[in-house]
Amino acid sequence: MDPIRQLSSREVYRNSWMTVREDGIRRPDGTDGIYGVVDKPDYALVIPLDGDRLHLVEQYRYPLGLRRWEFPQGTAPGLADMDATELAARELREETGLVAGRMTDLGLLDVAPGMSSQRGRVFLATELTAGPHEREHEEQDMRTGWFSRTEFEKLITRAEITDAQSIAAYTLLLLHER
């Protein structure tokens, strides 16, 4: 069977971080329909690791109405495309003040492939040097902290870390270390 085919597309919303479009589609069986898609630039997620310690950021996540711990992650400003390794270094420095002597590419994640085109590249940051953070205005409430792997895993099991990208990235780290 042929995949879903796009017949038309119209942008229904845009801001500095994303666009939303509605596509007219034709399914493999020949029936027509619509598909809503959130387009966001690719992001980088960084796992800062120092020995057994992981460096996390905590911030208020408005759609959830909750503060959440997660790995540093983000996109380039203004919907720009940016080299993934450069973006990872930028996000790490911006959110935590850390600079990595070594960045290792761990793999690719799709955020929500049923509704979004966004993909993310996961990096392991080691040989870390501390410095001042360079947070964006939207990140003014951000906090950071070091956690042992045991603490990190307990936060996941207690549903205090629920960010799917951070949990998936940690799995990529575990597979990398095998």
Image (cartoon, rainbow, N blue to C red):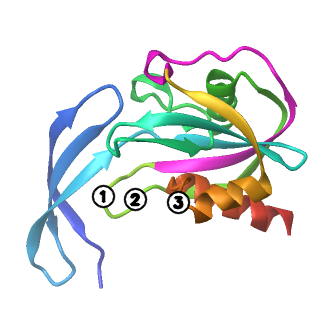
Residue located 55% across and 57% down the image = 109
Q: Nearer the viewer, residue 26 or 77?
A: 77
Which residue position holds label 2? Answer: 112
Q: Residue furthest front?
A: 158
Circle 2: residue type:
Ala
Residue located 22% across and 80% down the image = 28
Q: Is the Cβ of the residue at disc 1 closer than 8 Å to that at disc 2?
A: yes
Point out residue 46 in the picture as x, y percentages from the top left corner: 67, 41
Q: Which residues are magenta?
A: 119-140
Query: How many C-alpha atoms fall within 10 Å of the one at disc 1: few (<14), some, or many (≥20)?
Result: few
Point out residue 4 in the picture as x, y percentages from the top left corner: 25, 71
Mark number for residue 115?
A: 1
Circle 1: residue type:
Met
Q: Is residue 6 left or right of residue 106?
A: left
Residue 135 in magenta? yes
Q: Is residue 41 left or right of residue 116?
A: right
Classify the position of the N terminus by image quarter: bottom left
Point out residue 175 in the picture as x, y percentages from the top left corner: 76, 67
Q: Nearer the viewer, residue 155 or 170?
A: 155
Secondary structure at numbered mark 3: loop
Q: CA distance from mark 3 to mark 1?
A: 24 Å
Point out residue 73 in the picture as x, y percentages from the top left corner: 57, 38
Q: Is the Cβ of the residue at disc 3 closer than 8 Å to that at disc 2?
A: no
Q: Is the Cβ of the residue at disc 3 closer than 8 Å to that at disc 1?
A: no
To which quarter of the image does residue 115 belong? bottom left
Secondary structure at numbered mark 2: loop
Which residue position holds label 3? Answer: 159
- Who comes first in sequence, dot 3 or dot 1? 1
